[in-house]
Amino acid sequence: MKFLLEYLQKIQNKNGFISESDILEASKQFQLSPAEIFETISSYEKFNLWTTSEKVIKICDSPICHSKGGENLIKLAEKLLNTKIGTYNKKFIIESCQCLGECDKGPVMTINDELFTNLNEEKLKQIFKDQKLI
């Protein structure tokens, strides 16, 4: 499994997403069915199955982050960026996710692979300014 994840991560890093042909190639190389490869990909938030925006903003909406204000941050992000979760544009996309593995530091989000922890409204605004999103 470790080698499959490393293989998929290399594809993700190179292309920004994992295509159907990448899944078929991985299936051959690792002697797994395409469904098993797809299941692995869809089990990890870090993998994308389609081309995506320059900046992928993932805000954790797990019960723990939600209870620490994550829901309010999602609403604020939508307001600041004048968009809704899941709405694609070339510059950015906001996604909610169920866990980024940093529950003790919640609420959390990532922008691409950069992790931001212990978020509040002011910190979120500053991060968006620093990232030139607003």
Image (tube, rainbow, N blue to C red):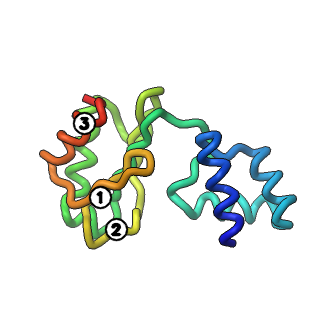
The answer to whether 66 is drawn above or below residue 77 in the figure is below
Q: Kindly report which numbered mark, 3 or 2, lies closer to the viewer in this rendering.
A: 3
Residue at horizontal 41 percent and vertical 46 percent from the top: 95
Q: Label 2 near label 3: C-beta < 8 Å?
A: no
Tag 2, which secondary structure? Answer: loop
Residue at horizontal 58 percent and vertical 64 percent from the top: 43
Q: Amino acid at mark 3?
A: Asp
For this orientation, the residue located farthest to the left is 122
Q: Quadrant of residue 124?
A: top left
Instruction: Please rate how many residues cluster around mark 3, counting C-alpha atoms within 10 Å: few if below 14, some from 14 to 19, many from 20.
Output: few
Q: Quadrant of residue 19?
A: top right
Say left or right for 14 vs 112.
Answer: right
Q: Amino acid at mark 1?
A: Val
Which of the numbered marks, if any, corresponds to residue 108?
1
Instruction: Please rate how many residues cluster around mark 1, counting C-alpha atoms within 10 Å: few if below 14, some from 14 to 19, many from 20.
Output: many
Residue 44 pos. (x, y %): 55, 61
Tell me how far mark 3 sits from mark 1, CA to CA.
Answer: 17 Å
First of labels 2, 1 by sequence position: 2
Q: Amino acid at mark 2?
A: Glu
First of labels 3, 1 by sequence position: 1
Q: Which residue is mark 2?
A: 102
Q: Kindly report which numbered mark, 3 or 1, lies closer to the viewer in this rendering.
A: 3
Say left or right for 132 vs 42.
Answer: left
Tell me how far mark 3 sits from mark 2, CA to CA.
Answer: 22 Å
Residue at horizontal 35 percent and vertical 55 percent from the top: 115
Q: Label 1 near label 2: C-beta < 8 Å?
A: yes
Instruction: Please rate how many residues cluster around mark 2, counting C-alpha atoms within 10 Å: few if below 14, some from 14 to 19, many from 20.
Output: some
Q: Which residue is mark 3?
A: 130
Tag 1, which secondary structure? Answer: loop
